Amino acid sequence: MERERHLLPPQLRNLLKPEAIERGSITNLTVSSPDIIAGLNNYYKTRLAQYGIQTIQDLANLTDFEPLKDDIDVSLLRKWTLIAQILVKYKDLLEKGLNFEEYIKKAKIGRILLLGLDGAGKTSSLETIQKMKTVAKTQPTMGLEVKTLVFANHELVIYDLGGQKQFIDIYLSDPQTYFQSTLAIVYFIDVQMPSRFKESLDFLENIVNDLQLLGEDPSVHIFLHKFDNPSDKTLQASKTDIKNRVTNLLTRLKIKYYRIEETSIYQIPRLVSAFSRVFQSISSVTQVLNDTLRFYAEMHNILGIMLLTKNGMIIAEYTARFTPSQRIAIYHEILEYVNRFDIQQKLIYSKEPINFVSEPDRFTVNILPLKLQSYSTESAEQEDYPTNFIVLINDRVEGSAVLSPIEIKESITPWLTSFILAIQPPNNKK
Ligand SMILES: Nc1nc2c(ncn2[C@@H]2O[C@H](COP(=O)(O)OP(=O)(O)OP(=O)(O)O)[C@@H](O)[C@H]2O)c(=O)[nH]1
Ligand SMILES: [Mg+2]
């Protein structure tokens, strides 16, 4: 009994009725009746059942609130479906009978491969995000170089595979050595070199074939790189051309999930954002964090929320209500603040938010330090945890959030803490 109760992190347990947890039906969570959710009483249970919603899984699948809205308030429906979706994401972990921390430990991170022809910009890009400033590296990589990068607590192992012809031949002739246990591949294509598109696509096809033969199913990220100046017409045309060709190729190879990013070492926010998405794609926790942020944004009427590491990488975000260019413009400014040492010091020690207006006077942005408070350890140990940043973005004119940024942060922090602690060990842990 005791063990079952600890399967869920405390913040998630708070979403459910205590009796539901005591009953020990937690392992059958997704087939449980929706009324295990706190506040969902018998009346609502009956209403939901009238619309065919009998289980947590049904509730998680609910997307169209329209038919129910006369019976049940939409804000309640939204809240409950989000809770149900979070619970469904835990199904896997619950079925394995693991608690959250154990689960994270077992979700061992494999490696990330940086691939692409010689001179495509792999090494420069990696060093640019490691240093958070442009590194225009010119030394070609001689074969395989193994590097690491810390993202949240994951020590990511990154294989930087030099792209000269003689090395490519070696990788492709020994895929087992180079491509096995791959969680993600980042494939770089130099958009300034249309004359090499064909050659680059051939290499990509060979890699994907090898991965499929090995039974590997990594997440695939295509970086259309050296996209230095988005308003350059020639560059735009090349980008559109290669984007179509990549899409066709990956569709033909039956790769369902892939992302295409436009990157440049001279556009750090885009590059960091693109890499953050690679890291998020292999982290089992970011999905839950993303849902949590969305949940909070909707509850408190906030336009957007981002959760950043100390150096500005995006751990999780809810930014669906911005256009991609708005999102990048806002993030650009956020990065400038977060990576300025004096501002960091001020943020961490004063605990007051930094406020600014972004994207031609449209959005107010608040950056707040997020000091983690462990629920299981004594307060003396708190200082050992690195600070993260929480960013709240709102419409300037509307000033729509009801609560102040500090109040919002206070209410989000306990929620996020247990998740982040699970993926982020203390600073002093080597
Ligand atoms: N204009 C522009 N040049 C870039 C960009 N990224 C990298 N470069 C340049 O491209 C050249 C090759 O960069 P590298 O990072 O060494 O390329 P690589 O993919 O690691 O090459 P190999 O190690 O040989 O496979 C260098 O001169 C970089 O300065 C970019 O975003 N824009
Ligand atoms: Mg290199």
Image: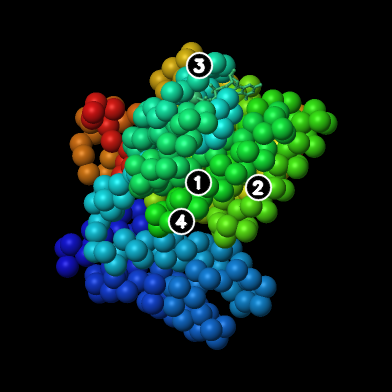
Q: Amino acid at mark 3?
A: Gln
For disc 2, the marked residue is: 246
Residue at image position (56%, 63%) is: 78
Mark found first going from the N terminus, 4 or 3 = 3
Residue at image position (41%, 68%) is: 37
User: Marks 1 and 2: which is nearer the front?
Assistant: 1
| Residue positioned most to the top | 342
For disc 3, the marked residue is: 139
Mark found first going from the N terminus, 4 or 2 = 4
Residue at image position (67%, 38%) is: 197
Image quarter (top left, top right, bottom left or bottom right) of the C terminus: top left
Is 392 placed above or below 387 here?
A: below
Q: From where the camera sits, is residue 292 visible?
A: no
Secondary element at tag 2: helix
Question: Neighbour class for label 2 at 10 Å: few (<14), some, many (≥20)?
Answer: many
Can you tell me whether the CB of the residue at mark 1 lies under 8 Å from the nearest atom of ligand 1? no
Q: Amino acid at mark 1?
A: Ile
Q: How many marks?
A: 4
Secondary element at tag 3: loop
| Residue positioned most to the bottom | 50
For disc 4, the marked residue is: 212
